[in-house]
Structure formats: structure tokens, C-alpha cells
Amino acid sequence: MMNLTAQTSAPTTPKANGLTSVEAEKRLAELGPNTLPEPEPPSPLRVFLIQFRNPIIYILLLASALSFATGRIEDGLFILVVLLINASIGTYQEYSADRAAAALRKLEQPSARVIRDGVACRIEAKRLVVGDLVLLESGDRIPADLMLVDASDLRCDESLLTGESMPVAKGRTVEGSSDETASSMLLAGSLVTRGRAKGVVTATGTATMLGGIAAELGRASSSQPPLVARLAKFTNALAVFVGLAALVLVVAGFMRGLPLHDLVMMSVGLAVSAVPEGLPIAISVALAVSMRRMAARNVIVRSMPAVEALGSTTIIATDKTGTLTSNVQTVTEIRLPDGTDIALDAHADLDKCEIRASGLDSDLVRERARRLLRAALLANEGTLARRDDLWVAAGDTVDVALLAAGRKAGLGQEELNDRYPLAARIAYEPEHKYAASFHHGSDRIHVFVKGASEVLIEMSDRMDSAGNVVEIDRASLLAQKEEMAARGLRVLAFAEGEIGASLAGSLGHGHLVDLVLLGLAGLQDPVRPEVPNAMKDCHAAGVEVVMVTGDDPRTAAAIARDAGLSFHAGQVVSGHDIDEAARAGDQRLDEITREARIYARVQPTQKSAIVASLIRNGHIVAVTGDGVNDGPALKKAHVGVAMGLRGTEVAKESADLVVTDDNFASIVAGIAEGRAAYRNIRKVVLMSVATGAAEVLLFMLALPFGLPMPLLPVQLLWLNLVTNGIQDVALAGGRPEGDELAGPPRSPLEPVLDRTMIRRVVQSTVVIGGAAFLAFQWMIAHGYGVPEARNITLLIFVMFENVQTLACSSERRSIFSVDILRNRFLLLSVLAAQTIHISAMYVPWLSGTLGLSPITPLEWGLSMLIASSLVLVTEVDKFVSRRRRDRSSHA
């Protein structure tokens, strides 16, 4: 563990010759290496044992122990095999421990150039210490938090840490200015995109901003997936129910004077009856099938409960950069000085070599646009070239965006450079806010300038208007610039001029005179084309969307409008607003998050606070993101969704889902699959609970009537795990019904067994348990032996399971209107369950263990007739429910 106090108090004033090796080794021993903590992953044994912490498991373990104690070895072994299978599946799923901290370590620079003992040398980044003097250049990953000592045209990409989409200019600043201090700090994990620098290390390891994020990721998530929470409540309630039922059974048995052995056996039977042993496996199948379907739709699931959690989502807190947008700066608009507006297709194919956009209604306008872009390409230090059928770019993102715009207009940088040989160049400097280049002409020196619009407007004295050079109208140009900036565009200006060839030997800033302003260009990180439709789908599905970004409010609002996010000015809040609300208490913060739709200038810790507040407000929260700064929020949310193409390993390892195509629309497809998975889980729960409750009812009715135990524990396990289990798996893997996005998400407070489920469980329990009891009682009264009566009673239950499976294929639609062939596996499972059960009657060792014997065709037909009574009950219930919904929708 790093000594944070020692680091923050360490001197940061650098020595001209850097640290000595002795000083560095001393600090390394005191503060520790420049690495992030490596949490010890749990052992496979520990993960395996954790699988047994469940009330259902406790009940089954007790049932197994009682079976062994009473000599029912087969029953005890059968239960233990079930438990081992469930635990093995759970261990396999959960033993991919959280590797977010390991992914963070990958962002650390493996080596760093420092000055030690007065000599520049390269060392392992983990050996950096506070006070080291580090040398940086374009392309370097910053190895620790640094304070700049010297910088030349330095820009850093901090988007993965702060969410800021544009590279940030850095430079030495005057002490005492809090606004400027940030520009003199370099953060570990960010990337130098341009320039050179020298900086002194101020923090290493966990004391850096990157280390703070790692520490946040190391904490356990405070939110539970909805399915886990619902099933926990369900299993706890089930445990209470089984305990009370067993108590009633024991008391009644004592009152009747039953021997202890019979009471123990009936208690074991009751426990096995009430516990849906196959439910955990069926739920795993439902989620696994949905995982495969989601993978086919470009959503990779890393945590199985996240499948259903995404379907339960009530709000998506989405990052802007790289999620809603392309994370590529693009010229989307050219504004000529006379107000002529040209809208560029942000996603045009560069190979088309044309601006496919509005505004080019004449050859003159086209030529004026090409003239502006010529200046943009010549006063440009980036490169854009085609290699192996791909466009490969290098340099500042703005320079690359301008090169791409020129390519769309049919202009190539190499051809222009050949036509206008370079004489001199003025590199971009933050203090000047422009870049310029001088090129040889036949008898003149051509000057091309690009830079901040307000600077070039002031620098120029003329402008292009309808192809003519006229006196500049600065007020009009500044108004155009402000209008473009208000729409979230980054605005650059372009100008050109000429000077005498005799001045070629002394070109510099003083020669940037008598310039003609060619116009303005608006750049932005454009919204992905599929996002607006995805937003509409979210709205139709009742899922709210909020944007959380590190960009400024004006840019965020402009992107949100383009993305189709509905909001008003009062719903745009900043990170400063979040901080003030947090200081006032959770209640104030929760008031803000109830209304806010855009969160701008947000820091990573603030993003986590926003997610926590949304959860307190009762939402099931999904968070999307791709950067290091998104890691804590992704982990805190009910379901974290990382972008797969541009996302960092930190985001992917912190997330539950990874969208492989970075397509926001894929998230909506995932929501549909998640809702389909939960529907299937409901069907399995209804099937399992109704069957188990019917078995309990059969036991409870048999006791007061003095009947023997209707079914043996091993028969109940066969019923619940084999015949029922096959059909549970088929229900779990059922195809979506197609209307998953037609309504709002479920309430976060909705239990697994809601009113509709409880009503249908009660109906099925009464019909199945009551009919089985009457049949068992009739057989005992008419001379059937107990084994024969149990044999036929077990067959009746199998028949009821077959009917229940078909009835559960849709919660709303009639069994007669459902296309059974669309889910052939479901039909095959019914036939398979029936075939396996009948076959078991003829396998000696299996029939002996289960107490089965062959039956006559008449007995089979009567059993089927009894089971068919369930169809009438379920169809009436569905019909009444449909009528009630129809009346509600027309009210």
C-alpha cells in the first residue's frame, strides 16, 4: 500500500539534473513502486463453498441428512448430486474474478524517460518516484501524475479519464491561479497527442487520479442485479413456508400418534416437494440462452444475472464520447463569410472523394469551399494516408478531421504539397492560437493560416464574399461564430494571403498581414447515425435516458438534441451543481437526479454519485461507457455496459455487458432479450412452484385422512428434476414473443411472484394437488396397493406437468393461439418427459429405485383426462385477464 501522506507532502520542485540514484532508491523504498494494488482473487474452493449459501440449499442439505439418517441412501445421494451440479455451474460462472484493477495496470507506461544523475535514461515506470524529472513526447502514455516544468505545443488526450472529448492544451502556468493549475498538470494514464514536455512527478501508484479510480473499483458493488434480489426474497419466503409446513405436519403427526420414522420421512418428502430443485438450473439455462442470443446481436454478457438486469432497466445513464458519438472529430459544417452554409455528411465514405451534402448548389460555392479546405490542408501537420485498404491517420485530431474533409472535397495533401512547395511553417502554439504555412509560388509566397476564429477574424482585413474579395465585416463573422458555437461546434477560421518572394528567407509571424478570411468550419464528435432511432425505441419501451459527460454543457446539450434526447434547459446540470447538492446531503442530490437529463463537466466520482442517487430514487440503472473514468460508475450500477471497439480494458472488465460494435442500438436489442429472458424465468417459476405447491397440498391432505405418504422422496426428486426439469429447460430457452418492447419496464419493487403469478400458482396447486389426492384416495379405497397407487399418482403429476408446460408457453395468449411449432424444443420436451417416465417403468434398476411399474393404456388415458382439467382453468383465467386489460386500455 502506498504512503499517500508522504507523497502529497513530498517536494515537487525539480532539480535541474533530476534525482540522484541514491535519492530515488530511498524514496522508492519509502513510498513503494509506481503500481496499482493487485487484489488477491478468491480461490476456486472458496467460490465453490459460497454457492451453498442459499436457503434452498440449506433445506436440501437437511433433507439429504435426514434421508441418510433414516436409511434412504438413494434419496440422500440423489439430493447431493443435485447440489454438486448446481454448485459446479455457479462456480464456473463466478470464478472469473473482477480484473478491473489489472486492466488499469495495463494503462501504465511500461517504461519512462527520466533524468537521473544528470543523464537522460529510460527506466521501468514502476520505479518512478515523487520528484523524478520525466521527459515526454508525442505518443507517450503519461506514467504518473506530473507537474509541468517545460512544454512545447503540448496537448494531451484525457478522454479516458475525464470524458473530455477534445485533446487538452497543456503548459506551464503562473502559480496561484486555480483555473490554470489544471493545464499544468498531467494525469497518469492520459496520452500525449502532440508536442514535447518535461514534468516532475507529484504522485505515483494509488496516489494518482488513476489510482483513485482503481481503489474505487476495488470496493464491492453496492447494487444487486434485480433478478438476484428478487430470487433472494423468493427463496427466503420459500424457506419460511417449508419450515411452517413441516411444523404443521409434525404437530399433526404427533397428534395422530405416528411413529418418529414416518414423521421424519414425511418431513423429508415435504421438504423435497416444496423446494423447486430444478429451478436454479433452469434459470441458468434461461440466462445462458439469452446470452447466446445477445452475442448474436453484438452484446457479450460477462455476468449472467446482467441479462435480466438489462431487461429490467428503467434508466440508462450513458456516456457521450464514444457511446452516443463516434469519438472522432469531424468537420460537419463550413460557413463562408457571406453566410453561405455547407453541411458535410459526418459519416461520408472518404473513398467517394466528395462532399455529399447540402449547400453546394453551384460550381462557385463548390470552388469557394475547396479554397477554404486547401488552406486547411496546407497549414496542417497531420497525415492521412491509405494503407492496405484502410485510412491511417496521425497527428492532432483536429488536423486529421480537416484532412478528411479535404479528402471528401477531392483534395489530397500530397498533391497540394507538390503544387505548393513548403517554404516555412509556424507551428501551433497555445499562446498564438493559430498555425500557418508559407509556400513557394511562381513569383510570390502563398500564406495559409488556420486557427481560432476570433484571432483570424482580427488578423484579416478582407474576406471572400460570393467569390469576390471585400472589406471584412468582423461583427457579422463573430455573430456567425457564436451561432455555430451555441450548437456545440468547435469553430475554426481559415485565411490566405500573399507576400513577395524576396521575403522568403525571413518568414515569420510578422508576415501574417493583408489576409483574406476564407470562412469558418465547425467540428464536432458526431452522433452515431443509429442513435436517434435507438432513443425512440427506449422511449417506446419506457426506458429513460440521461447523458453523463465530461464535456461542457453547451456541447453536451447540442449532442443530446442531435441524439434525440428529450430535455429542457432546466434539466442540464453541471458537475459543480452535483458537488453542491452532495454537500447539502443525499436528499438534495436525489431531487436533482429526479429531473436532470444531462450532466456536464462531470468527474468520475461525481458520475458514481449520480448512479447511486438514481438507485436511491428507485431506478434499475444501466450505465454505458468506454473510458477509465467510467469504471467506478459501471461497477456501481445494476448493469454496466462497456463499448467493445473503443472501450478501454478498464471499462470492459468493470462492466457486466460489452457491446462489440459500440452501437447504442445494440443496447436496446439487449433490453428486449433481457425482458424475454425474465418472461421465460417467470414461466419456469410458475411451472416449478405450482408443481411443488401441489405436491405439498397432496401431503397435507393425505395426513388428516390417515393415508400413507402419497409419494416417496426419491419419486419427488425424479418428478422435480427429471420430468419437470426437461420441460423447465425448454420453457427457459423459449423464443421471444415479439412484444417485449411494447410496454414499460417492470417495477423495481415487483416480486418474482406478483399477483398474477400467485393467482395462477394457487389455481394450478388446487387443481393438480386436489385431483392427485382424490385419485390417490380413490385407489387406496378400491384395493390398490400403496406402491401401485403411488405409481399412478406419479404418472398423473407427470401428465399435469405436460399440460402446465404447454399452458405456460405464453402468459397472455391462449394455448390454442400459440404457434407451438415455433418453439419445437418445447413440444419435444413434453414428449421426452413422457417417454422417459414411461421408459423408466421398464428399466429394472431404475424402476426398482423409483418404485415404478408398467401401466395399462386405460390407466394412461384416464391420467391424461384428469390432467386436461388444468387447460380449462388456465384458459378461463387468461381470457378474463385479457378482457380486463382491454377494458383498462380503452378506459
Image (spheres, rainbow, N blue to C red):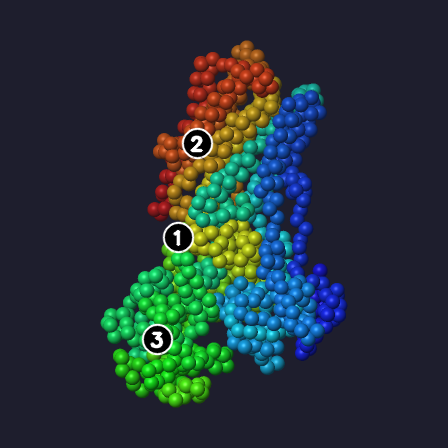
N-terminal-most mark, 3 or 1 = 3
Give me the C-alpha separation between circle 1 and circle 2.
Answer: 30 Å
Residue 60 position within the rendered picture, expressed as x and y whole percent measured from the top left: 64, 32
| CB under 8 Å between discs 3 and 2 | no
The residue at 62%/37% (across/down) is: 87
Element type at mark 1: helix
Residue 766 position within the rendered picture, expressed as x and y whole percent measured from the top left: 50, 28
Q: Amino acid at mark 1?
A: Asp
Q: Which residue is mark 3?
A: 419
Give me the C-alpha separation between circle 3 and circle 2.
Answer: 70 Å
Q: Is residue 236 above or below residue 382?
A: above
Q: Residues within 10 Å of mark 3 (few under 14, many from 20)?
A: few
The residue at 61%/51% (across/down) is: 98
Q: Between residues 591 and 224, which one lies in front from this camera angle?
A: 224
Residue 165 position within the rendered picture, expressed as x and y whole percent measured from the top left: 48, 66
The residue at 56%/17% (across/down) is: 847
N-terminal-most mark, 3 or 2 = 3
Element type at mark 3: helix
Q: Amino acid at mark 2?
A: Phe
Q: Which residue is mark 1?
A: 537
Closer to us: mark 3 or mark 2? 3
Closer to us: mark 3 or mark 1? 3
Q: Is residue 516 above or below residue 525?
A: below
Q: Is residue 237 visible?
A: no
Q: Which residue is mark 2?
A: 825
Q: Is residue 674 visible?
A: yes
